[in-house]
Image (spheres, helix red, strand yellow):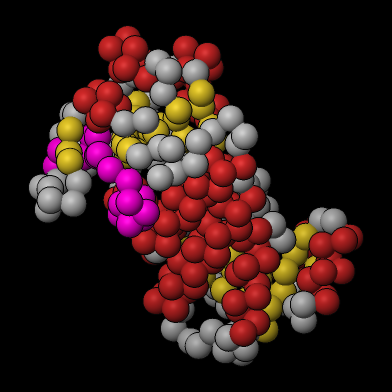
């Protein structure tokens, strides 16, 4: 049975992930957290020493930033050089965005690397955290109440589903755009107004607009029709789905709100990472369970 885990790099999410593993009785080591002072709960080592110290390794979300390990609590940049790669040999590695990791460290394709960020339970819970973070921004920036405001949610993926449901509970007048007929049917069934994405320009202006689609949806033409007096919150990954230059020209308040789970709810996000990895270990017949 596995008894030790090292958290290599990351932000507050990884600290809460470490605490969750500790609560399960594992020995937990932090690598790439030398800006922090240990309170006795964890041993803080260099990334290489932390890797050598444990059976399981957990990389952060995102795992890579600017061609190096995402390690904001590290005093020095952590690159996947030969020494680091050698220390990873034979280890069981859990990471997010595995393809990005392989881009900077192709040798890891020969190692045991598992991507927790592709798991459905992770993505659903992450969507809930993102939706709550988006609501927090809207509550702070919008000068009216969410209740009875005209709100548009662009896209009906996991985040769109979670967000539109929360907005409905707050008594907002919710419209959701989608391209698929099946999504439009589900939107209507859940007591929201449904509109095809290509017909958004026919809608009356909105008070608040959330975008979840990672493609340019809210261009200057559409913004001029439905968002002149709205606040616009883009939740989609880079480059997003909003023409921010057009928003600036039209004096529309717009924000690209990225990595909201880590900012708005790092505790839940970190515990979700830990629970997802635990599920992966228990499902893998070749894996031992955690102690």
Indicate whether residue 206 is drawn in magenta: no
Is 70 placed above or below 142 here?
Answer: above
Farthest top residue in view: 82
| Relative vertical location of residue 28 with respect to residue 165 in this rendering, above or below | above
Res 65 quadrant in image = top left
Q: Residue at x 53, y 57 (%)?
A: 126
Residue 127 point in image, percent of width and height: 57, 59
190 shown above or below 248: below
Left or right of 5: which side holds 196?
right
In magenta stretch: residue 27: yes
Tell me which residue sits at (26%, 29%) in the image: 53
Residue 176 image position (x, y, % from top left): 72, 69
Indicate left or right for 82 with 49 as reference.
Answer: right
In this rendering, is residue 109 above or below 146?
A: above
From which residue to which does the magenta span run? 19-35
Q: Nearer the viewer, residue 174 or 116?
A: 116
Residue at figure coordinates x 31%, y 31% from the top left: 54
Find residue 169 and report its horizontal and vertical position in percent.
62, 84
Foreground of the two, 234 or 272? 272
Q: In the image, what residue occupies the spot 49% across and 53% down?
A: 275
Nearest the viewer among 147 and 8 is: 8
């Amino acid at each position: 049975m596995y008894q030790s885990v090292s958290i290599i790099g990351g932000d507050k999410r990884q600290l809460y992930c470490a605490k969750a593993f500790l609560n399960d009785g594992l020995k937990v080591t932090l690598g790439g957290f030398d800006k922090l002072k240990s309170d006795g709960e964890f041993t803080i080592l260099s990334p290489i020493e932390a890797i050598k110290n444990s059976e399981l390794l957990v990389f952060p979300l995102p795992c890579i930033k600017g061609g190096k390990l995402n390690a904001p609590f590290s005093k020095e940049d952590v690159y996947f050089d030969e020494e680091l790669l050698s220390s990873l040999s034979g280890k069981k590695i859990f990471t997010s965005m595995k393809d990005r990791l392989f881009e900077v460290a192709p040798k890891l394709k020969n190692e045991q690397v598992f991507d927790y960020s592709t798991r459905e339970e992770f993505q659903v819970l992450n969507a809930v955290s993102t939706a709550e973070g988006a609501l927090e921004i809207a509550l702070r920036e919008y000068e009216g109440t969410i209740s009875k405001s005209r709100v548009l949610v662009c896209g009906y993926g996991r985040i769109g589903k979670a967000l539109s449901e929360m907005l409905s509970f707050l008594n907002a007048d919710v419209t959701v755009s989608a391209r698929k007929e099946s999504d439009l049917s589900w939107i209507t069934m859940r007591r929201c107004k449904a509109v095809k994405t290509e017909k958004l320009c026919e809608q009356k202006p909105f008070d608040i607009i959330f975008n979840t689609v990672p493609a340019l949806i809210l261009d200057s033409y559409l913004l001029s029709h439905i968002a002149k007096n709205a606040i616009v919150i883009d939740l989609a990954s880079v480059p997003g789905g909003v023409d921010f230059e057009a928003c600036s020209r039209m004096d529309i308040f717009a924000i690209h709100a990225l990595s909201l789970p880590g900012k708005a709810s790092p505790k839940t996000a970190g515990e979700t990472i830990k629970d997802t990895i635990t599920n992966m270990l228990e499902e893998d017949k070749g894996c031992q369970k955690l102690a």
